[in-house]
Amino acid sequence: MATLDYVEVPSYATRLRSDQANHDLRPAPKVVTSLPRPDHSPVRNMSGSPITQPMSPSKAGSNLTSMLLSSALQLPANAPAAPRSQGTKKGSSNLLSTRDPLSIPITTTNFRRFVAKSGPIFWLQDRLEEIVFWKRSWKYTLVWMAAYAFLCYFPRLIFLLPHAAILGILLVWHPALRKGESLDALPPRVIQPMPQTQSSEGSADWLANIQAIQNLMGAVSDVLDLAVKAVPYLTYSSPYSGAVLSLVLATFVLMIPIVNMLPMRTTCLVLGLLPFFATHPFTQHTLIPTLQAGLRPMVNAWRFRALRVVDDDNLEDKHWRAELRVVELWENERWAPGTAGGSEELSRSEGFWSKTNLKPGERKAWTRGRDGWSGVSDDGSGEVSSNLTFSLGPGWFFVETEDWRPDLEGTWVGPGGADESGWVYTNDTWLNPQPNPLEEWKSSGGMTRRRRWTRRIYYSPPLNV
């Protein structure tokens, strides 16, 4: 019997199609899947596509509060007045969250009051950010670091902080210090006018409070979205909950003798000053980029493996019992000098990355091969529009519990790999791959980049009826 010799086909080979139709082979079925979504990928979006964001508020109508509440709150007709008090015992004291019944008029009134009176809260938030992130002056931040170090070694002085805060406010508003005069020169019983404690509705300060509340709600939501990812591991909704329990118990026992040996004052000093060193401009712009450049391949490999562990944890039993393979897709962009549009703060004078910068006749924005010629049509007349059509063999399906993942390692390009988002940078002719763009490319005005996306498929043989 004759034997067949199999030849390994390189991954970068391009399949040649015959001009003559072959009716002996049954065409593979088309499987439709959505395109990769860079904005929803687990890595930071590095694309320079123009992003339209609302600018800071300057003018608004007097009914802005009513518009916000009417669009955000849509209560059902049979909504209970006290949703949390259902099932509680009678006579029990109400909590602050259940003090007033659920009502749109009360919500509107309290929201108007909160917007008008929340200015000092966000003023304090801005001052804290200026201190921690070194935005005002290095001397200004060093003074607060010295004050914190002083409190660490004399912790009893913490009880004097309320008095110090009140004295500071009194001295700041003292009429002699505000006018630069001496105390003896002032007439007796000088009464200063009451400072404005709330902003009038529709004013610039009132609109700034609305903007701060908007951004605070987004920040809180982002933090909760990150925290909710750990919930399955803590509620035994994941098979790794047992391993997490064992790890926490082991480290808890090991930390008991270590905690007794740690000096409390020195530990509080180090832990308190560590955020200041982490947010220093030298750390952010010099130290961290240098460490990232040296440890980038290892960090990207560990990040890719961590994402793969998460995907494996979401696999179902039918996926584990089946054969798994990987299909790939390439995302292509070109750099163009100029601004990316939008507001003046968001515009970048050096240039921006975008798929719209690709030249006519070159590779498409999405290609199935690294050669760039097995492209995807933008208008959908070809093989793909908003969805991508793959020709998978009979019985092959995409894994339903996961989406497209960017290749953070960049092993397909060889040594050097990719940047932290999986991009590999090349010159104007898509050659000489580098993990970072070169300055000579930017000065010449021609620079490209591409990123590899992968998704797993599994084999489920059709049932014979």
Image (cartoon, grey):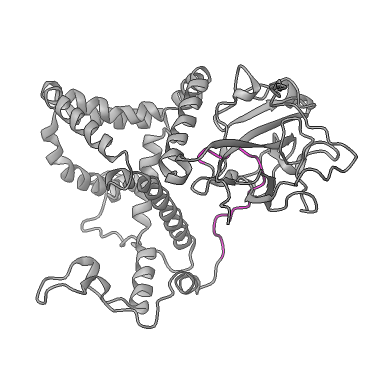
Q: Between residue 242 and residue 272, name the one nearer to us.
A: 242
Q: Between residue 326 and residue 441, name the one nearer to us.
A: 326
Occupied quadrant, residue 165: top left
Query: What residue is rendered at 46% in x and 30% in y?
Result: 305
Q: Is residue 134 magenta?
A: no
- Image: 326 above or below 166: above
Main SS of residues in magenta: loop
Residue 162: percent from the left, percent from the top? Answer: 17, 45
Q: Is residue 52 magenta?
A: yes
Residue 195 visible in the displayed image: yes
Residue 323: percent from the left, percent from the top? Answer: 53, 37
Residue 316 visible in the displayed image: no
Quick check: 310 left or right of 413? Answer: left
Query: What residue is rendered at 42% in x and 49% in y?
Result: 222
Occupied quadrant, residue 195: bottom left
- Image: 270 above or below 190: above
For the record, the magenta segment spans 42-59
Occupied quadrant, residue 410: top right
Query: What residue is rendered at 75% in x and 46% in y?
Result: 26
Instruction: Give the farthest residue toward the bottom.
Output: 77
- Image: 304 above or below 102: above
Query: What residue is rendered at 42% in x and 31% in y?
Result: 137
Q: Between residue 380 and residue 67, name the one nearer to us.
A: 380
Residue 451: percent from the left, percent from the top? Answer: 64, 33
Quick check: 155 left or right of 247? Answer: left
Quick check: 398 left or right of 312? Answer: right
Residue 1: percent from the left, percent from the top? Answer: 71, 22
